[in-house]
Image (cartoon, rainbow, N blue to C red):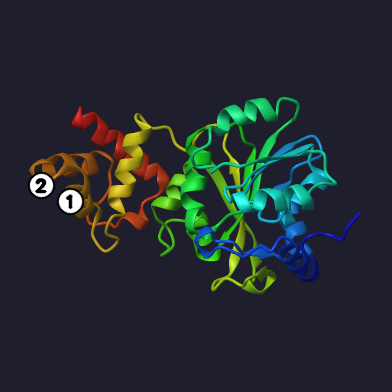
Amino acid sequence: MKKDIATPARTKEILAKHNFHLKKSLGQNFLIDLNILNGIVDASGFTEKDGVIEIGPGIGALTEQLAKKAKKVVAFEIDDRLIPVLEDTLSPYSNIEIIHEDVLKADVQSILASSFNDVEHIHVVANLPYYVTTPILMKLLEERLPLKSITVMIQAEVAERIAAVPSTKEYGSLSIAAQYFSEAKKKLHVPASVFVPQPRVDSAVLKLTIRERPLVSVKEEAWFFQVFHACFANRRKTIMNNLVHNLVGKEKKSLAEEALHRADIDPMRRGETLSIEEFAALSDELYDLRN
């Protein structure tokens, strides 16, 4: 068996063999540290009975470590230049399926049904490209896929925002959206030095444990999302101002006032001070009044 992919020498050798040049537009930064990869695998907590989805396998550094422990790995790769590279680097493993598709456009639900019919649980474990982190995470959460957890390496700053609590500067609509569907915990800090090429910022490993049911019960989920997004549209403005300017309109200011009153929320507060439960109450009051 060849040496692990995730070493500086082997990575260099693979890139040279396939004459592969990294594409900045695809956010390609390859991991060259086995300790970090093992940390990601450990943080995810999957077992040999489970299936794992990976997004953006690159040259297969993480994929290889996943395949050593999981029952099956399905990896989505968008870059056609990497398909022959992955076929080469991952040839020793029979439990890996590479899907040459953009995960944002893929019918992930049906792929899970056909590829993971004999596993106990399904987990996502990935080193996500920075430029599509939020859309990918929201797709995985909003589509209500049968996932146990999502463990991803992402930009440290984004991990802070997702795991943030009310009344902190990091807390915002992304925190609420992620925590509505999952329990978010930062697991590891990852320095830029463990990548080739080195990104300009540090990364973090974040684990989202999927909730059996959303954190709060709301009358209309899409409306709830609209409400809290509106309340964070301008962080310096009060909830009242944000609701009027970004949701209900000036002519319906009284509707916003009444909803805030009924939800027992001071209209002079700012969005980042409200808990998810308070946003749920506000959303339901606005929903009733609007209808």
Instruction: List x then y, in percent, for residue 259.
Output: 22, 39
Do the residues bearing badges 1 and 2 touch, measured as CB atoms within 8 Å?
yes
Q: Along the line of sight, which residue is nearer the eye, 150 or 167? A: 150
169 to the left or right of 181: left
Instruction: List x then y, in percent, for residue 163.
Output: 52, 55
Report helix, strand or loop for mark 1.
helix
Q: Which residue is mark 2?
A: 250
Q: Which residue is mark 1?
A: 245
Q: Is residue 43 visible?
A: no
Residue at 35% x, 35% y: name it.
222
**Who comes first in sequence, dot 1 or dot 2?**
1
Tell me the crowding category of disc 2: few under 14, some 14 to 19, or many 20 or more residues within 10 angstroms, Cα based.
some
Q: Along the line of sight, which residue is nearer the eye, 153 or 102? A: 102
Report helix, strand or loop for mark 2.
helix
Q: Along the line of sight, which residue is nearer the eye, 97 or 245? A: 97
Residue at 51% x, 46% y: name it.
136
Q: Quadrant of residue 291?
A: top left
| Residue type marked 2 | Lys
| Residue type marked 1 | His
Tell me the crowding category of disc 1: few under 14, some 14 to 19, or many 20 or more residues within 10 angstroms, Cα based.
some
230 to the left or right of 251: right
Instruction: List x then y, in percent, for residue 24.
Output: 53, 65
